Image (tube, rainbow, N blue to C red):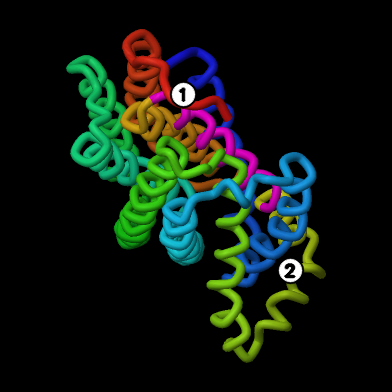
Amino acid sequence: MSFFALLLVLTAACCHATWNYHLKKANCGRAIWWLVYLLTSVITIPLLLLWDPQALTRITPTGWFVILISAPIHVVYALVLQIGYKKSDYSIVYPTARGAGPLITVLSAVVILGDAPSLTGWCGIFAILAGVVLLTLRTDKGADLSRVHTGIFWGLLTGVCIAGYSFCDAWAVQRDTGLTPASFYFPSIVVRAIVMTPFMLAMKDWREQVRSIWKNPVSRRALWVVTVGSPGGYILVLCAMTMAPLAYVAPTREVGMMVGVIVGAILLKEHLSLAPLRTDFFFSNRLFVRSSQEAKVGGRMC
C-alpha cells in the first residue's frame, strides 16, 4: 500500500469513528439514516453532474447492477448498527463490527478477487483482528456481561454487512464498470433513499421521528455530521481501493476502532480495559508499517 493510500484510509477511519460517536450520542431511530440519505442525494448528485456531466452515462449495465446490489446492503448495515448502539455500548459494538467485517472481507478478496497478501501481510491482518477480540473480551469488574454479549452480537451482524458492501464496492471501482468512487457512491445513496422510503412511510410516527431530530440540537448535529462524514470518509476509502488491494485496505481502516474505544471511554463514559487497548495499538501499528512496505500500488486514481 502506498503512503498516499494509507493516508486516505487513516483519515477515513478517524472520520468514520467521529460520525459513529455522534450517531451513538444522538440515540435516534432509523429516521436519521433516511434523512441522511435524502440530504446527501439532494446535495451530491447536482455537484457530481456539475463536476462531470457524463459521469452517469459512462456507467455500464454491470456498474448499475452492482450499485443496485450494494445499496440495500448499506441500508441494512445502517439499521443494524443503529440497533446495536441502542442496545449496547459504542465501545463494544463499534470495534466488534470493524473487526469482524475485515476478516470476512479479506477472505472474500483472496478467494474471489485474488488480492492475496504476503505472509507478513497475513500476520499483520490477523494481529489487528486479534486486537479486536481482546477489546471485546471485557471481563473487568463492573462490566455488564449481558450488555457486552449483546454488543458483540450486533457488532458481528454489522461486520457481516460491512464485508458484503466492501466486497461489492471494491469490485465496482476496480473493474471496468465506468465507475469512479464518486459516480459509484452518490447514485448508491439515491438508491438507498429509495429503498428506505417505503419502510419509513409505513411507520405511523415517522413525522414525529423527523421532527424530533430537527428540534433536538444533539440529534440535529448528529444528522449533519453523519451527512458529511459518512460519504466523505467512504469516498476516501473507495479512492484507496483504486490504489491498493482490498485485502490491505479493509483491515487498515480498523485504526478507527481504537479511536472509537477511546472516544467511548472518555466522552461517553463507557467502561474500558486498557490492557486490550494497548495490545490492539501494538498490533495495528505493525500492520500499518508492514503493509505499507509490501503491498503493490495499482488501479485507477480517483
Magenta-highlighted residues = 227-244
Q: Quadrant of residue 17?
A: top right
Quadrant of the drawing holding the C terminus: top right
The residue beneath circle 1 is: 243
Q: Residue at x 47, y 29 (%)?
A: 242
Q: Is residue 135 left or right of residue 50?
A: left
Magenta segment's dominant SS is helix
| Amino acid marked by disc 2 | Ile
In the drawing, does residue 61 fall left or right of residue 194?
A: left
> What residue do we see at 49% from left, 57% from top?
64
Q: In what element is the residue under mark 1?
A: loop
Q: Which residue occupies 53% across, 43% down?
A: 179
Q: Residues within 10 Å of mark 1 (few under 14, many from 20)?
A: many
Q: Position of residue 126 (x, y in %)?
A: 23, 29
Q: Position of residue 205 (x, y in %)?
A: 65, 87
Q: Is residue 133 at least partly visible in the picture?
A: no
In front of the other: 299 or 82 = 299
Q: Label 2: how many residues lie within 10 Å, few (<14), some (14-19) or many (20+)?
A: many
Residue appearing at x 59%, y 72% in the figure: 194
Residue identified by numbered label 2: 213
Q: CA distance from mark 2 to mark 1?
A: 38 Å
Image coordinates for residue 265, horizontal then vertical, percent = 52, 41
